[in-house]
Amino acid sequence: MAEQLNSMLSLRGLTRRFGGLTAVDAIDLDLAKGGLVSIIGPNGAGKTTLFNLVTGIDRPDAGTVHFEGQDITGLSPERLAAAGIARTFQLGRVFGNLSVMDNVLIGAHTRLRAVKPAVPAIGPLLELGLALLRPASVQAEEERLREEVKAILARFGERLLPRIDQPAYSLSYANRRRVEIARALALQPRLLLLDEPTAGMNPTETSEMQALVAELNAEGLTILLIEHKLEMVMRLSDRVIVMDEGKKIAEGSGEDVRSDPKVIEAYLGHGLSGTTEQESAA
Amino acid sequence: MSSWLDYTINGLIVGNVYALVAVGLALIFGVSRLINFAQGSIYLVGAYIGWVAVVQLHTPLPLTIIVVAVAAAIVGLIIERFGLRPLQNSVRIAPLLATIGISFVLDQLVMLTFSPNPRALPSQLPEVRFQVGNGTIGPLDLLIAGVGITSALLLFVFLRYSKLGWAVRAASQDRDAAMQMGVDVNRVNQAVFGIAAALGGVSGMLVGMYYNQIDTAMSLQATLKGVVAEVVGGAGNVPGAVIGSLLLGLVESYGVAVFGTSYRNLFAFLLLVVVLVLRPNGLFASARQAPPEPLTGTFIAPSRPVRIPRWALAVAAAGFAILPLFPVSFYVLQTLINAWLLGMLALSLTLVAGTIGQVSLGHAALLAIGAYTSALLSLTLNVPVGLAVIGGGLMSAALGTLLISPSFRLRGHYVSIATLAIGEIVSLVILNWESVTRGPIGISGIPPLSLFGYDLISPTPIYWFSFAVMVVLALLQGRLLTSHLGRSFRAIRDDDIAARAYGLSLNRYKSLAFIFGGFAAGVSGGIAAHLYSYINHETFNTQQSILALTVVILGGLGNVVGAILGSVALVGLPEVFRIAAEYRILIYGIVLLLLVRFRPQGLLGTM
């Protein structure tokens, strides 16, 4: 139990079944504060389903999720966001018609205080009134968050700042991924889940992203990463977990995992046997 | 107790008819994830083709059925080819709006061809009743049951054993994969729309014979009933749709037995709301599953809104404000007053349908709530009219939001169904709650608008009053859109899963949108009540909901200035061109279709 107390995130026996298919099968996982653990595995291994279970988008059939020692199994995504868990999505889920600025401001939604007083029952009505009246405190908060968004966007160099007022649908694929990460950072997360942040990026963009993830981790952010690019996984991770068909088939340092025959078989064996690659169940 | 058997048999027979509509809806939903709002119109067309065949051409029954099935199938194919196929790659809202537009065009065409008066559709079967236990059944009952069971069997054989049937099932499980395997999805769609339309048409004809009456109001009722049955059974689930239909038939029949005929529809819609709240995926749906991630598609058409400079808006507003000082006719003022009232409704709808993406089809119910509240407050409690109108707005905001809240967990097309049903429930409650609403008699003698003790009787002060109220509401809504709520609403619309992952509670923000929008609509209804001096349960009907939706699409979803511009255009242009009233709804339907096809972002662009 000692390990569980020190860890930021700990999963025990986490399981999710879809009909006859067990997408996530009794997964145990521990992620220490400030650590970076990567999950790898062939398509359809259950990685994204695991993320959905941790972030409340889906509920497990069995097992528990503890976050900073507290049982958060089955809580709603809204509550988990408020608790400090942020994520990005595998296929990119930016708000297409919102500007880059508004997209990232949504990330800071859980941190709104002045305009969203924590009053029971009439809280929503107060929020409506404050949004219309906008007293100085609300304006100041909005202004502060806008400055903060610009600072976050500056981490991506000149990729996003010149496009701050453009709608997200007009951005390139890589820039949408960056907006997602900026939005996650605006939440000031204690735990960040990145689902294939470099999917669809060229080598230059990938190395930029790798540098950013390393920098965030060095700043003390705890990160759970799904990634296919093994080079990046090897460089960044404290520990690597390999999933196949919902099960954890290997765990350890990058070097251990890379030479594990079960891992090689999972990648090559399945790749050749031609099982359907259904990303939605991945 | 003998009548219970009768009610059970009647329920099963009616349920069988619903099944013919619901199975078609389920097939279409399965393949294209679309709730076909035009299904009831095909049912209507089927009934009238049946009337032509029976009364004018004197066809024998088997031939009548074939004629109706073939003609309805052709209508279905035309809808698929020209209404929906061009929208295959457009935004998610487009096909939904298209089927709504098609349904209005078809209904109006039938109405213009055959007049809105009910007609008798005689059954072509002998008038004998067979004793079954203590109840009786007639040959038509057996025919309906026979057609229901036969078509279910034929459909089963088609889906299971024919190559095209396989393709339909494959496409409904995974459209993209089916396409990659060489399935011609267009042919699948054609087959599905043809079958669904044939079933719907035959069912309309049989129902017409069953009640020996057809009229143009059948369309909306059929769509609603079919959708209720389909949703109860689980969307896209064909056997579920059959069972849902039988259940719906029984619930209605027993409801009528206990409470009387005027409660029939109330039970149907309450069943829908209960199912949506408790089991939104239907009674037989498999376990909860997160919806797949969207790739790049958004709910509404991406566009950059046309930026109109503030001074231009101010000039336009000032121009309209001083208009009565010039020698304009009362007719012009009256037309613009109608435009301002519609503008308030459109502001409300553009917020909930455009900004937060809840395409409400029952928005006229908010008008009705505001109108009845304001009328009753001023009549029975002697509340000053100015305050009564605000009371109407507040009641619409509160009650409207409460009534609509069961639909907050729904997405896309389901929201439209739920709001349509909730709108019908409001109208039925007004009809049946005589002690408060005076039932079918309506409320007469509503006092005129008055402000600080001065009655507003002549058009000029009424014009100023309604214009001022609309401008204030528009300014408030504009301010709302630039606040954090504006971006939160739009984020929920664009991707509710991602919005929740960043802490946005759907219930909270959808409630706030409906509270704000409900107030604007309620105020509009309240003012209207005092202008008309008489209202009843039909004053605010689905046509107004559709007109408001057309206005909102025309102006640009979520666009405040667009909502007002659209109102002036759709109220004013028919007056300018002196278009007869009965053609207007047809024109609104055609405008809606053309917009969805050629300018989905509207005149001023979506926000």
Image: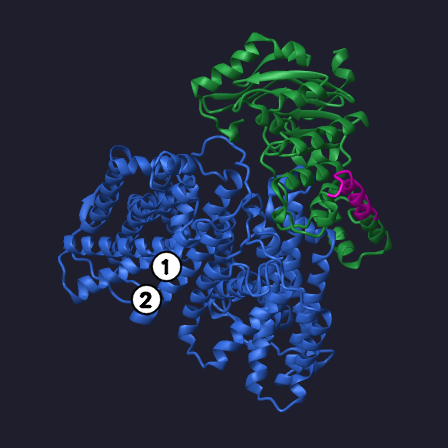
Chain colours: A green, B blue
Image side of residue A148 versus residue B37, left or right: right
| Chain for disc number 2 | B
Query: What type is the residue that disc 2 sits on?
Result: Val
- Residue B249, x across and y down, in percent: 35, 46
Please report contact status of discs 1 and 2: CB closer than 8 Å, yes or no.
yes
- Viewer-closest of B183 and B486: B183
The residue to which callout 1 is attached is B219
- Viewer-closest of B151 and A171: A171
Magenta stretch: includes residue A152: yes
Q: Quadrant of residue B533?
A: bottom right
Image side of residue B82 versus residue A240, left or right: left
- Viewer-closest of B179 and B122: B179
- Viewer-closest of A159 and B149: A159
Sequence-earlier tag: 1 or 2: 2
Residue depth check, mark 1 versus mark 2: number of the one nearer the observer: 2
Q: Is residue B89 above or below residue B607?
A: above
Q: How far apart are marks 1 and 2 (CA)?
A: 10 Å
Secondary structure of the residue carrying tag 1 is: helix
Q: Quadrant of the C terminus of chain B?
A: bottom right
Bounds of the magenta span? A144-158
Which residue is painted at 38% across and 38% down in the image? B179
Q: Residue B94 carries which label?
A: none
Q: In this view, does A70 lie above or below B374?
A: above
Q: Is residue B304 above or below residue B254?
A: below
Chief secondary structure of the magenta portion: helix
Image side of residue A120 versus residue B4, left or right: right
Magenta stretch: includes residue A66: no
The residue to which callout 2 is attached is B110
- In this view of the protein, can residue B260 be seen by the observer? no
Which residue is painted at 50% across and 49% down in the image? B92
Secondary structure of the residue carrying tag 2 is: helix
